[in-house]
Amino acid sequence: MTPEPFRLPGHPGEPIAFRFDGRALVGRAGDTLAAALLANGIHFVARSFKYHRPRGIFGAGVEDPNAFVAVGEGARAVTNSQATLTPLTPGLVARSINRWPSLACDVAALTGVFARFLPAGFYYKTFFWPDWMAFEGIIRRAAGLGTAPADPDPDLYDRPNRHCDILVVGGGPAGIAAALAAARRGADVLLVEQDIMLGGALGWEDQHIDGRPGRDWIAARVAELEAAPNVTVLTRTCVVGHYEHGLLTALETPGEGAPVRQRLWHIRAGRVILATGALERPLVFPGNDRPGIMLGSAVRHYLRRHRVVPGRAVVVATNNDHGYATAEALLAENVPVAAIVDSRADAPPVAFGVPVHSHSVIAGTRGRHRVRSVLVRSLDGLRRGRIACDLVAMSGGWSPAVQLHCQPGGKLRFDEAIAAFVPAASMPASQSVGAAAGLLRLADCLDSGWAAGAGEEAAAPWQADGPESQRIAPIWQVPEDLAGRLKQWIDFHNDVTVDDVALAARENFHSVEHLKRYTTLGMAPDQGKTSNLNGLAVMGAATARSPQEVGTTTFRPPYVPVTFGALAGRERGRLFRPSRRLPTHDLQRGLRAHMEDYGAWARPAFYAHGDAPMTDCIAREVRAVRTAVGIMDYSPLGKIVLSGADATAFLDRLVTARLDTLHPGQSRYSLTLSESGVIVDDGVISRLSDGDLLMGTTSGGAGSIYGLLNDWRQRQCAGLDVALANVTDQWAVVLLTGPHARTLLARTSLTIDLAPAAFPPMTLREGRIGPVPVRVNRVSFTGELSFEVSVPAGYAVSLWRHLLALGGDLGLLPFGLEALDILRLEKGFLHVGGDTDGTTVPDDVGLGAAVRNKPLDFRGRRSLDLPALRRGGRLQLVGLALLDGTAPLAAGAQLGGLHRTSHMSGEGMVTSSAWSSTLGRPVALGLLENGRARTGETLLAWDDGIARRVRVVPRISYDREGARLRD
Amino acid sequence: MLLIHCPFCGARDEAEFFCDGEFAARPDPARADDAAWSDYLVRRDNARDWIVEHWVHAFGCEQWLAVTRHSVTNEVRAVRPVRADLPGDGS
């Protein structure tokens, strides 16, 4: 076979080899994948979403609802790519999708045979709970388009920012005029064009400016734009989102050789000029979805721009004058046009020597994988005839591309003259020009663009010729009595037909938003660019409303599909969420710490010991703390200093602990509540001096509690003298805990008296180790004698080395967070966020009385008196002892009475659970309805369908008297 | 994405701020009955109109700002510090 049998002579591009569904093919430089496929006579490239109907290349740009293919191989494959937007590159590999085993022979196409059983709403009416579960697998397999690659994308993506005075979206004649006019005023102008070059439809339509071909005008204007220092042109870039206050996002695909695969630009523009053009609509007639049935504008595009003839025997179908331009273009290249089918009654009998069937429509088509003939019927029903063809070029009128106008809230009105929605009024900082504003004459495009760019009423300095009007007389569907049995398709991607819309109307889904969701009209990746108006006009006809009355659905970003890679940019893998490192991170690695992410921090989970399994390593660390001494980098603990004459009064208004009675050197445990009374954080507050308090927070709460203090300082306590400093990163904390902790600390040159009488629990002392300032807090989260030793962060590593060297003979071991969790769980200590949830108030964890007795108001205090927080039946924190088996319960296991037969609607849940090597049995905490009154009761804990008996016990499992702590 | 004119830092992207919603003054807890207190906790007018919200420039100057925004058009009319003793108006 000759290469490119449908390419006209005279194409300047170099031949390029590519593959489609395994076939080796040749296209030309400058082609899109769609153009190259058509040059090889390939129309049928896809199957529709629902019925797997054969679908052909239909449009030439963003509007195409059919030609979605997978492009690329392996990890670089992009599924659901539009062939009409994919530049042809050497060696490109593309595959059809949504078919099995092959495009021509697709098993699922059988659904099409049973199409009458799958009307709109079929799924809603057929599959509902509990049966949905049974069908879900089958439906999920049948649904969806391409398959996403399994491996990580090896390419880079960027998300750059750009600011400009004026952003012009669309580089057609209106956009070029706007950019040049704005540039003359000295504005910083950014012109963004989705295509690989500027010019828009003027590049291939047969139109003249100043008596010269449109292409000459484009070349001259592009030269002017390039010469202007204040204009930046971005081609291959599609604006996909338009948000408030002049923010737009644009997806750039720079192509081969660029350092990144795509860029998702965030552009903040002072003013936005939308020159996004218009999209041609298909005609709705029976059998209008076969491959070989295309938009007339697309036929002209392929013919003139790519010199590709999409067919050899053409029928033009139209309801306006633009269809005749298609016939004229084909005839100029000696492509025979068999007939023009014009639904208007006043059409001429013959045009360019081609017979015109006036007041007629296509009432049916034939052809399995490609259209072979059309049935033409006059609207009065008197004339009918069949015409053989391999291409139908249809023109249903133009719909301005109003998506970017509407996304930030722009309104529309229906313009009867062009039978389409146009922007009703400009938005504060954006306006539509040219075809996007419903101006279909070239002269109007130039003038409106120029005036918008100039910022004043002014005619463009160029004269364009062209027809005055397209003289459209819309016909939204073929009348039922002429239509026969074939379906009239509206949404080609999602298989929505006139019958589906009529059904929605009969079932009272009259609202256009309901219509969309009930029928899936416009919900496919093409977002209904060609189907929206046809669909709502059919709905209007069925309910005796005008398109204006029916209205449009909400337009939301993105305008074209955006890859996840572009959305993610560089924020993936290790950069997805930067991990904060301990001051002793490298030292911990040297001690064979197994680092894991806890909140934002990378912290040791446990330390490897020989080849011992993880559980043994953790048990060894627990034993060291219970019998000798353990050391941990505790630096992530939040540390906020409050200073000033009113620091105490300020913090007293915020937290549950009473601070006006807290003397220098004393520490006190405290909760922070939300204003609703819910526990949001806990920690220890110490008084450094009369005017300075040190507030400890959980490691996860440091940022949010600082934010809360800042909030109350400004909004609730504006008159108070208090200053805040978040010193979490400035002070490293070394935790020493275990019976030998004092002995170890005493071996340093620390200038603090460590004797129990001089330094009792819940006190803080300041001193020095050598020249280094040190704060030591006697606070225990393990139940053992504990010292939290704080030093300026830069000294953390040397202090660790010092202590490790001093403590070897004491059995000193570093321990990780897994061991810490077991230690605190044995003691029944609360882990806020683990043992509490978004409803837990102090009384639920046994701290109600302590909190209520504070004689001052504080954040959330008033809420604790609300009836909802005082009623019975609340979830209360209890200890749980396992009666069946030895494997620890899963946190999250549901609790219920012994009579229960399933986990549904339980009475609580396990919140913390671990194996206690100290006690030789599992320990657990849980939230249980009325839990404190149920000590001794036996319950079931449901874990993944298996129920085990547990007994409600006191929270503290180890050293209930706290003797070890007091030592 | 809003562009908020912080009186202290200039025009900044919404992503630098945190919005606490419409401001509700904290009633005197000793005097507020349960209904009044609950209203303060959860009830907001949510009008289709100009509304005053409190935003904090969390990734900037950390100042709390009263932002007058139209809840339909998202137009921002005025940005003032919540603390009356601070100068500045970024509108």
Image (spheres, helix red, strand yellow):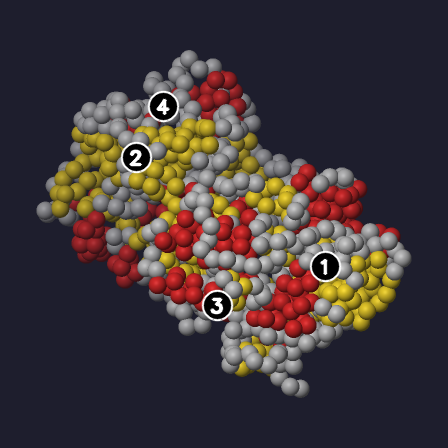
Q: CA distance from mark 3 to mark 2?
A: 51 Å
Q: Nearer the viewer, mark 1 or mark 3?
A: 3
Q: CA distance from mark 1 to mark 2?
A: 58 Å
Q: CA distance from mark 1 to mark 3?
A: 30 Å
Q: Secondary structure at mark 3?
A: helix
Asked if residue A378 shows in the view, the reply is: yes
Label 4 is found on which chain of the structure?
Answer: A
> Please, is residue A307 above or below residue A646 in the view?
below
Q: Nearer the viewer, mark 3 or mark 4?
A: 3
Q: Residues within 10 Å of mark 1 (few under 14, many from 20)?
A: many
**Rendering coords of residue A711 (x, y %):** 33, 31
Residue at horizontal 37 percent and vertical 44 percent from the top: B13
Q: Residues within 10 Å of mark 2 (few under 14, many from 20)?
A: many
Label 1 is found on which chain of the structure?
Answer: A
Of residues A748 and A568, the one nearer the viewer is A568
**Identity, as a three-letter code, of the amino acid under mark 2:** Pro
Pointer 1 or 4: first along the chain: 1
Q: Is residue A269 left or right of residue A497?
A: left
Of residues A419 and A124, the one nearer the viewer is A419
**Rendering coords of residue A254 (x, y %):** 44, 66
**Identity, as a three-letter code, of the amino acid under mark 4:** Phe
Residue at horizontal 18 percent and vertical 51 percent from the top: A795
Q: Is residue A135 left or right of residue A706?
A: right
Q: Which residue is mark 4?
A: A858
> Residue farthest to the left?
A771
Q: Nearer the viewer, mark 2 or mark 4?
A: 2
Label 2 is found on which chain of the structure?
Answer: B
Residue at horizontal 46 percent and vertical 53 percent from the top: A460
